Amino acid sequence: MTSALLSVRDISKRFGGPNPRAVLSSLSLDVSAGDYVAIMGESGVGKSTMLNIVAGLDAPDAGDVLIDGTSLSGLTDDELTRLRRARMGFVFQAFHVLPYLSVAQNVELPLALLQTDSAATRDRVSEMLRAIGMSERADSMPRELSGGELQRVAIARALVHRPTLVLADEPTGNLDPETAAQILSLLKSQIKQNRAAGILVTHSPDAARTADRTFTLTTSGLVRQDQDLAV
């Protein structure tokens, strides 16, 4: 048995009909509580496919993914949906903040979907807004926010329900370098505080350096980078 919160075991994936192309081949990775991992790689190498498989949005042709000991391969679509809702948090480059909801309402959304007690919801939303430095913007609408503020809201929404696994896909791709550095620091600190397993997919070496471990995804699998620095 592994103590990892996330265990990716020899997953492979091919695309292409009668002449399939191997995108992932025997890929394995363990990520423990509080561990923050960055994965880099060229476009088309399979980073998004890997994230989709880890999230249970796509199934591997071989291998398995376990989240806190639960095998995704044995779950129905409904069970996968419930697992994602309860145990995963997603941060995207495009923010995906709902424009018709206030900052607080956007952050509250995962708790509402989980039907969390109203008092606990208020406390947790307030806690997350303080953590991202936006308590005074709770009633603001997304159109009133900067790109960095929108990404802060996205991070708070991803983490408000204390997920086991946090998946961040190019979360700073639309931000200037100074704001990107602030967002990455916030994301890492929240992953550590919540003892989540975190995966950052990025093209940016600067972003990757904020992780505890950095890998490059190649056609032959994940290659550990020797120059990893946790900052």
Image (cartoon, rainbow, N blue to C red):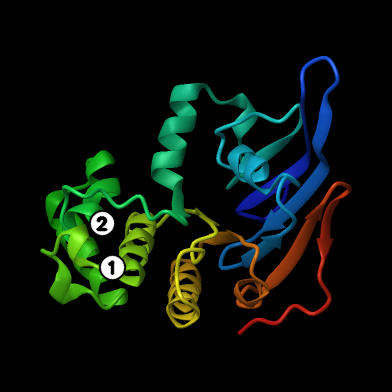
SS of the residue at dot 2?
helix
Name above or below for residue 96 compared with residue 126: above
For the residue carrying disc 1, how many other residues have a C-alpha within 10 Å: few (<14), some (14-19), or many (20+)?
Answer: many
Tell me how far mark 2 sits from mark 1, CA to CA: 8 Å
Query: What residue did someone put label 2 on?
Result: 107
Task: Establish if 11 lies above or below 95.
Answer: above
User: In percent of the image, x 30 and y 52: which residue is there?
Assistant: 97
Q: Nearer the viewer, residue 37 or 203?
A: 203
Pointer 2 with pointer 1, Cβ within 8 A: yes
- Residue 197 image point, x, y percent: 56, 59
Q: Position of residue 109 (x, y in %)?
A: 25, 48
Out of 35 and 43, give the one closest to the viewer.
43
**Which quadrant holds residue 217?**
bottom right
Figure quadrant of residue 69: top right
Q: Which amino acid does label 1 sit on?
A: Met
Dot 2 crowding, Cα within 10 Å, few <14, some 14–19, many 20+: many
Q: Where 222 falls versus 21 (above or below)?
A: below
Residue kind at label 2, given as amino acid type: Val
Q: Which mark is residue 26?
A: none
Q: Where is residue 6 in the image (x, y as percent from the top left)?
A: 63, 51
Q: What element carries label 1?
A: helix
Q: Is residue 36 above or below residue 116?
A: below
Residue 223 in the image, given as x and y percentages of width and height: 84, 60
Query: Quadrant location of the C terminus?
Result: bottom right
| Residue that sits furthest to the right in the current view | 220
Between circles 2 and 1, the one closer to the viewer is 2
As drawn, is 61 to the left or to the right of 83? right
| First of labels 2, 1 by sequence position | 2
Q: Which mark is residue 128?
A: 1
Residue under the point 44% across and 52% down: 89
